[in-house]
Image (cartoon, rainbow, N blue to C red):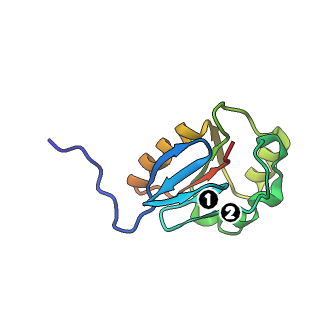
Amino acid sequence: MDVTPLIRKGSQVIQSYANGVFKVSGVRYDHALLVSVDEAAPWDIGDITDIADLNLQHFSSLIERSEHIDVVLLGCGKTMTFILPALRAELKKSGISVDVMDTGAACRTYNVLMAEGRRVVCALLTA
């Protein structure tokens, strides 16, 4: 029995991550990245690599389309770190639910949820 999930043609699949470099659907990225089923795009956060330096403005493009997103998976590097409680509250108030995890877990979880048809975005730091 084949249990490989069917993935819609053209969907963005995170293939690998190592040393701050991501490979998404055959394309290499070496900067902070937002990945959704439809696109992989630079995450405009400047040179931030520490989750503690993120603020609400860094999530503005996601807030603008929050009604089309079920969950944002925030990959924060090799070690899981929490976002500040005040930022989490502001994001929730703006319609964004964020699950923070190490980057490897965020990439794997994104692929599973995307394959299930969930409206998921993976926000990846290069740390």
Residue at point 14%, 41% (across, down)? 1
The residue under label 2 is 62
What percent of the width, then of the height, locates residue 28? 52, 58
What residue do we see at 82% from left, 46% from top?
87
| Horizontal side, residue 55 vs residue 72: left or right | right
Tell me where residue 62 appears, x and y as whole percent: 68, 63
Pick whichever, 120 or 51, lies toward us: 51
Q: Quickly name the residue at label 1.
A: 34
Image point 76% across, 52% down: which residue?
91
Mark 1 is on which residue type?
Leu
The kind of secondary structure element at disc 1 is: strand
Kindly state the secondary structure of the residue where label 2 is placed: helix
Residue at 83% from the left image edge and 52% from the top image edge: 55
Mark whose residue sits in front, 1 or 2 = 1
Q: Where on the picture, by quarter, is residue 44? A: bottom right
- Callouts 1 and 2 close, C-beta under 8 Å: yes
User: Furthest residue to the left?
Assistant: 1
